[in-house]
Image (tube, helix red, strand yellow):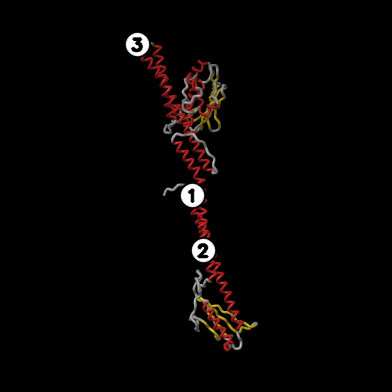
């Protein structure tokens, strides 16, 4: 059965209260009855001593069986005891019976045995019991008294009133505790369920695309953590949403520009406005190459983020791998007047050579784009414990602090106008990060605007 959290909490409090109150009453009732049995037995013992004292006080020694006053006393007293459920037998010192009032449980007979009035005492067996007491004068035993009675003993009126009052109080207490627990449960359930309901509503609004709204502090640690997680999820989804819009806009712009150039030039040639000269055809080929390069980079980005894309790892020397990749940039760096400085030590690693070469190429290309003519690029490779570390540093334009958290996002560019002038499309660093992570490594960046940037890749040497 599906129930709301608030209902479950109220029911839990009520059931717990009933269990605790019921257990308390059961234990109390058990010990009360035990104590009451002791009380009843003690009261019977006191009654027995009272009877013995009364009979002993009126007992005549010579001979007691001939004392008419004593016999009259026993007759009246014995009948009154029978009405209370007690039989009386009196013997002299020789054991000869003087008086007996019984109901067939002994050899003598008198009036029918009378049960006591009232409710029977529970948990006490109903066996017939006899107790004997000596009648003494000084240190001499002059007679004996035997008392007989059946259990269960009987509650008198005051006993019944006490037990009835106790049961009523127990019932009222149970009802009061149950009602109080239900009320407390209702309040606590509201306090617990209300912030959860708020978080649920926030999640529903997020699902509908409404990311605004902040975290609300509550008095519960776990709910605060849940609220923070939902708030963080909202911010992340909002960032992803904005990123998708930016990606769509960027892709549209990046592909539209060369396609527009191609279309306008080809249409002009078809209409006879332009002649298909070598220079114009080479320009169109450059635009086609640009489109092809962008498609390849997007494809690289998709493949790098695909968990099913497997690495083909082989043993390699990271220093040698870096030298081979950087050699392809020497002409472009020389043309721009940039000096390349390489420092590397042998670094045996297990990597996918093609994919890791792409990391090096993307970082080198990024440094080349954003380093002014006459600048420097430093590349180093070394071992740090069990990890191989590749560092690419430049003294270029650097990256502004607000841009640092986003530089590895897809299509993010720190300077839109300058990025387009330099040919950047915001994909290279995303691919580098995805490739590094696929090797079980990390990539980090440090930068100071106007002073340059440092990108560091660290991977396990053993792969």
Q: Tell me the quarter of the picture where residue 374 sits.
A: top right
Residue under the point 50% across and 44% down: 194
Q: Which numbered tag is attached to residue 167?
A: 2
Disc 2 from disc 1: Cα separation: 30 Å
Q: Are marks 2 and 1 in contact (CB under 8 Å)?
A: no
Q: Position of residue 448 (x, y in %)?
A: 57, 24
Any part of residue 357 in sight: no
For mark 1, what is the residue? 9
Closer to the chain start, of discs 2 and 1, is: 1
Name the mark nearer the viewer: 3 or 2: 2
Residue 7 position within the rendered picture, expressed as x and y whole percent measured from the top left: 46, 49
The residue indicated by pointer 3 is: 272
Q: Position of residue 39 (x, y in %)?
A: 56, 70
Please report the residue visible at 52 percent of the width from the left and 48 percent of the height from the top: 188
Label 3 and label 2: CA atoms lie apart by 112 Å
State whether residue 199 is above or below residue 179: above
Tag 3 secondary structure: loop
* Mark 2 element type: helix
13 shown above or below 140? above
Q: Where residue 199 appears, x then y in whole percent?
A: 49, 40
């Amino acid at each position: 059965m599906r129930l709301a959290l608030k209902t479950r909490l109220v029911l839990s409090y009520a059931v717990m209260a009933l269990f605790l109150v019921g257990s308390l009453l059961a234990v109390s009732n058990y010990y009360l009855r035990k104590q009451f049995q002791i009380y009843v037995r003690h009261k019977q013992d006191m009654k027995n001593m009272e009877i013995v004292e009364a009979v002993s006080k009126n007992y005549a020694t010579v001979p007691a069986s001939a004392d008419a006053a004593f016999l009259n006393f026993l007759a009246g007293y014995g009948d009154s005891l029978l009405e209370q459920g007690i039989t009386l037998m009196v013997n002299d010192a020789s054991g000869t019976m003087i008086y007996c009032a019984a109901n067939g449980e002994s050899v003598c007979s008198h009036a029918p045995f009378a049960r006591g009035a009232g409710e029977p005492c529970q948990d006490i067996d109903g066996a017939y019991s006899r107790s004997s007491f000596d009648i003494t004068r000084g240190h001499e035993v002059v007679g004996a008294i035997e008392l007989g009675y059946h259990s269960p003993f009987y509650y008198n009126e005051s006993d019944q009133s006490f037990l009835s009052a106790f049961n009523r109080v127990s019932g009222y207490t149970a009802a009061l505790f149950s009602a109080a627990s239900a009320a407390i449960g209702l309040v606590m359930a509201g306090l617990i369920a209300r912030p959860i309901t708020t978080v649920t509503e926030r999640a529903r609004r997020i699902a509908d695309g409404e990311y605004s709204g902040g975290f609300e502090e509550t008095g519960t640690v776990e709910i605060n953590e849940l609220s923070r997680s939902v708030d963080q999820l909202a911010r992340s989804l909002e960032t992803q949403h904005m990123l998708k819009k930016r990606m769509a806009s960027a892709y549209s712009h990046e592909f539209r520009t060369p396609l527009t150039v191609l279309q306008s030039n080809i249409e002009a040639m078809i209409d006879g406005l332009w002649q298909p000269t070598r220079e114009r055809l080479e320009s169109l080929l450059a635009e086609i190459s640009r489109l092809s390069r962008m498609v390849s980079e997007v494809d690289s980005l998709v493949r790098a983020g695909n968990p099913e894309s497997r690495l083909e790892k082989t043993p390699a020397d990271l220093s040698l791998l870096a030298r081979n990749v950087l050699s392809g940039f020497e002409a472009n760096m020389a043309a721009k007047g940039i000096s390349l400085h390489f420092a590397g030590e042998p670094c045996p690693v297990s990597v996918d050579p093609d994919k890791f070469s792409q990391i090096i190429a993307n970082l080198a290309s990024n440094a080349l784009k954003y380093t002014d003519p006459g600048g420097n690029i430093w590349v180093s490779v070394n071992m740090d414990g069990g990890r191989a570390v590749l560092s690419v540093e430049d003294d270029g334009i650097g990256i502004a602090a607000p841009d640092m958290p986003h530089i590895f996002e897809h299509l993010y560019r720190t300077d839109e106008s300058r990025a387009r002038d330099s040919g950047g499309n915001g994909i290279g660093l995303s691919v580098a990060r995805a490739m590094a992570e696929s090797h079980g490594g990390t990539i980090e960046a440090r930068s100071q605007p106007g002073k340059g940037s440092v990108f560091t890749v660290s991977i396990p040497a053993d792969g």
